[in-house]
Amino acid sequence: LPGDRWSRQLLFAADPDNGYATLPLPAARLALRSGDVVRTEARIRELSERLEACGQRLEASRSLLELEGRN
């Protein structure tokens, strides 16, 4: 999360304004909460890019497993 050197989670994090409550999509939600449209768009774009990269890695892994299963 921007401004939080400890948090690296894109999907869930503790809500900094609500104790131990869970905050889904924290970077985007915090940017939205602040009312900063430009930052919100940037965080949603970053989330989308990272999810796309994860999907590509999963697809590559699936393909490798299929190849290994044929041998």
Image: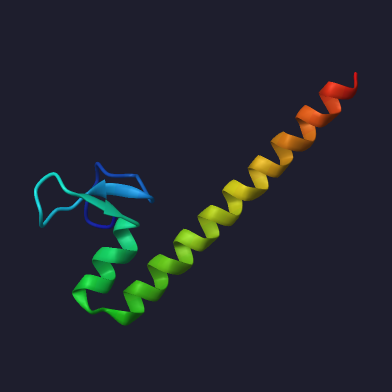
Q: Is residue 17 above or below residue 61?
A: below
Please tell me in which quadrant of the rendered image residue 35 appears: bottom left
Q: Residue at x 79, y 36 (%)?
A: 63
Side of 28 relative to 70 (left or right): left
Question: Is the residue 49 above or below the residue 62 in the image?
Answer: below
Q: Which residue is at the far top?
A: 71
The spot of residue 33 in percent (x, y) is 21, 71
Residue 46 at x, y = what percent?
46, 62
- In the rendered image, the quadrant that contains the C terminus is top right
Q: Position of residue 68 (x, y in %)?
A: 83, 23
* Closer to us: 1 or 64: 64
Residue drawn where x is 10% and y is 57% of the image: 17
Q: Out of 22 and 3, give the one closest to the viewer.
A: 22
How many numbered marks appear? 0
- State the scheme by which the image is colored: rainbow
Question: Residue lying farthest front?
Answer: 21
Position in image of residue 30 (x %, y %): 24, 64
Residue at 20% from the left image edge and 74% from the top image edge: 34
53 relative position to 29: left or right: right
Q: Is residue 58 left or right of residue 24?
A: right
